[in-house]
Amino acid sequence: MRSMMAVAMMLWLGVNTVCAQALTAITPGEVWPDDKGEHINAHGGNVMYHEGTYYWYGENRPARGFTTEVGVGVYSSKDLMNWKNEGVALAVSETKGDVIERGCIMERPKVVYNPTTKKFVMLFHLELKGRGYEAARVGFAVSDTPTGPFKFIRSLRPNAGKWPMDFTKRDIKRAMALDEAKYKEWWTPEWRRAVDEGLLLKRDLPGGQMSRDMTVFVDDDGTAYHIHSAEENLTLNIAELTPDYLDYTGRYIRLAPGGHNEAPTIFKRNGVYWMITSGCTGWDPNEARMFKSKSMWGPWEQLPSPFRGEGANKSFYTQGTYIFKIEGTDQYIFMADRWIPRSLKNSRHIWLPIEYDTDGTPLLFWKDSWTVDN
Ligand code: DGJ
């Protein structure tokens, strides 16, 4: 009996040693085990560095279904390869009727640190329970610590009553004169012009602009921007946040009206802002787009996709979610999801180092395996 117990103990130890073995590489598209051997359940999220540790936030997704049953998960790491499950950063509410009630949809959470308020601020795409994707809101939550628990503050549609800062009086007058009833058919030249001129922008003005896929970008001067798909996902908005990152200053611009961009990701290098987005094809991959500008307020220039090689026309079967810098280096990592809609929990994480053309334009090449030089 004693020897049987000893064998069982050795087997148990063996299994746990395998699970706990340190990872020495990032293997895009493979199962990415956390400290407990479970595939990391943090999708559509971001990585934030704070005081020597990286934190990875993302959608905790169920094995089946499309709604949020748990909330936003958080993991921590020192080397970007080995991640400890830190639990739930923002939990769904168990109270019926709450805006973040279990069964709502929380997508694309992004956490940033505000050094002035000393708070960790989370923005995320929120859809109300049982209402599909019609609410199109952004949610705000805060915490005193990176792993939470985050406290939900409120949700809204950004910039109610505000015209984009680059809209002149003439632009406003022209937008006000547009009649939605005349543009029932999408993608006609007339409809495209009307969208560009503010057909849906005007429609959403009273209640605020729609906010679905999104990211948050903090500039070198500490100013934060919420970049979100608005106008039925047809137009991206770049909206400045207040110094506490919990509201809008009312300053925003539209990027690529009618361009149908989702999944915005952005970084700044050598004074240039680079934005990589996707098209809109639900959970299916499509060809990425890229934009560049010397200022957040534009003008933004559209460039070809940064993906190169086999599968580039489908962005290696991924959709971007965030770009972050390895602390103390000039190395940026492009984080993306390879969605598995029949089991979102098992969607794969595709992390690739950003490379550059001779003129500094970002490029993405597939890698089966690569190591982070910390
Ligand atoms: C694409 C978005 O990028 C995802 O975050 C998610 O909203 C799916 N669409 C839903 O179809």
Image: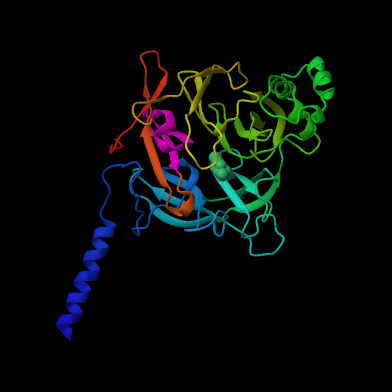
Check residue 328 for magenta coloring: yes
Q: Quadrant of ligand 1?
A: top right
**Residue in view at x 68 percent, y 19 percent:** 189
Quadrant in which the N terminus is drawn: bottom left
Asked where in the image residue 193 lies, by quadrant, the reply is top right
Where residue 104 sits: x, y (%)?
63, 55
- The front one of 62 and 326 is 62
Residue nearest the observer in this picture, 51 or 319: 319
Q: What colouring does the structure picture have?
A: rainbow
Q: Is residue 162 left or right of residue 188?
A: right
In x, y percent, where is residue 256? 62, 23
Chain part drawn in magenta = 312-338
Q: How many marks?
A: 0
Q: Quadrant of the C terminus?
A: top left
Where is residue 16? Give x, y as percent.
Answer: 27, 63
Q: Quadrant of residue 242?
A: top right
Above or below residue 178? Residue 64 is below
Q: Residue furthest bottom?
A: 1
Q: Is residue 249 magenta?
A: no
Q: Residue furthest left?
A: 3
Q: Position of residue 82 (x, y in %)?
A: 33, 49
> Can residue 50 be seen by looking at this rendering?
no
Q: Residue at x 63, y 38 (%)?
A: 245
Q: Residue furthest top?
A: 359
Give the side of residue 207 with respect to residue 369, left or right.
right
In the depicted structure, whether residue 286 falls above or below residue 299? below
Is residue 253 visible in the rendered structure shown here? yes
